[in-house]
Amino acid sequence: MTASKSQKSTAGFLIFLCWLLYSVSYLGKVNYSANITQIIDFYGVSKAEAGMSPTFFFFAYGIGQVVNGIFCKKYNIRWMIFTSLMTSAVINLIIALSTNFAIIKWLWMINGFVLSILWPTLVRLLSESLPQKQLGRSSVIMGTTVATGTLVIYALSSLYAHFDNFKLSFYTAAIAGGAVSVFWLLWYGKAVKMAKSEASDELTEKKQETNIVDEKVNQTKNEKKLFFTCIYVLCFFAIGVNLIKDGLTTWVPSILKEEYHMADSLSILLTLLLPIVAVFGNLCALSMHKKIPDYVTHCGVVFAIILGFIGIIIGSISFDMVVIMLAGLVIVNFLASSLNSLITSIFPIFMRGKVNSGLYAGVLNGFCYLGSTLSSYGLGIIADNWGWIAVFEFLMAFCAVICIVWFGYGVYKKILKQQ
């Protein structure tokens, strides 16, 4: 009983350390998007021009996810994670001090690449260090990092906007990132050593798990085809997830400002509703996964629901119903966040006996950020030329395509099972 409690507390500390680090990394990742309306006004640039920096970031981050997913098995985790967060902190400090808009997109691109080290490496660490019983807990807790970090920086950005000083958000990211990277360096070794020591009770269980994995390796040819088809489909779905999730996070302040003439501080403050609700999306994903164990079907059902709510958002904008529009945005973001957790956290961690968790976490997250790349610059261009309703019509059409792919996957799955 005592050993079990010790194991839980030790595993809990390692999870907390990873959670803290990744949450803080978001302060220096989405602070640009949180202040994009002020950046547009401050530098006198268009939405498309302002959207270039997040586009460069997401492009570098997406490619970096794949690269780091492939090579993270060879990393010295302690020093790679420290270097990643500390470099991001320095970049945020440089942007805070700089007045040259032309260099921001290049700095933000470098920021994207160095931060791409974190997710696949942390997933590798957790999958290798935690007892089997802690995997579900870790996937849920780590799934809250995105919403937590986004919530904190949007709340602070709203306060900073009230004082008309958006650069404070970059100073905040620099200070917090530097402090937490040092904290990580000091505590990493002890946390991992204790976690692996306490997890030794599960040695027998892991051997049994290995035997199960050996049996899975001998699966039929059709089962292998279905598994890899599932991976390909999830990669495509990942694009849609962040196209919607990060598209809303980036552009909702601009929508509220332009469509409803809200002040910057109020539009950013209302955008806080998105990450607040999104925190619970991870629990929703895990709960729903127990009822719908097929990952593709799970995603397809949720995208079909999102499609309907985007239709409601379009109607609310047309009839100037801000409360209904906000409710629709919150629900859509909640659902998209739950899918992000399913694809990038639950799937790679739960499949650790069958796949390289770090690799698949990196690859799937990389495709998520391909969607993020499209959301920043692409949606900005659509908004500049055709307005915000056209943006949501595009997202609705993308969801419809995803539903068609889901249907095709279901047909293919039945054909394989019948062979």
Image (spheres, rainbow, N blue to C red):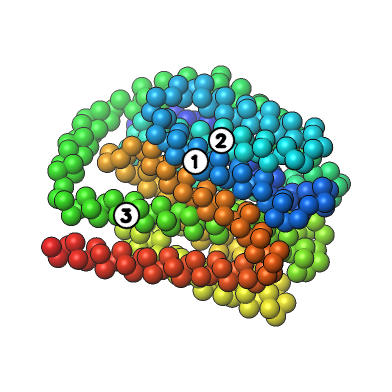
Q: Mark 2 points at which residue?
A: 113
Ranked by sequence position, the earlier of labels 1 and 3 is 1
Q: Nearer the viewer, mark 1 or mark 3?
A: 1
Q: How crowded is mark 2: few (under 14 residues within 10 Å), some or many (20 or more)?
A: many
User: How many tags in the picture?
Assistant: 3
Badge 1 amino acid: Ile
Tell me which amino acid carries mark 2.
Phe
Using the numbered discs, state the Cα–Cα distance from disc 1 to disc 3 in whole angstroms. Answer: 21 Å
Q: What residue type is labelled 3?
A: Cys
Which residue is denoted by mark 1 in the rendering? 63
Quadrant showing the C terminus: bottom left
Percent x, y for residue 415?
19, 66
Q: Is residue 197 positioned above or below 347 on the image?
A: above
Q: Earlier in the sequence, mark 2 or mark 1?
A: 1
- Give the camera-side residue of 198 and 254: 254
Mark 1 and mark 2 in contact (Cβ < 8 Å)?
A: yes
Name the residue: 34% across, 28% down.
199
Q: How far apart are marks 3 and 2 (CA)?
A: 27 Å
Q: Mark 3 points at which residue?
A: 230
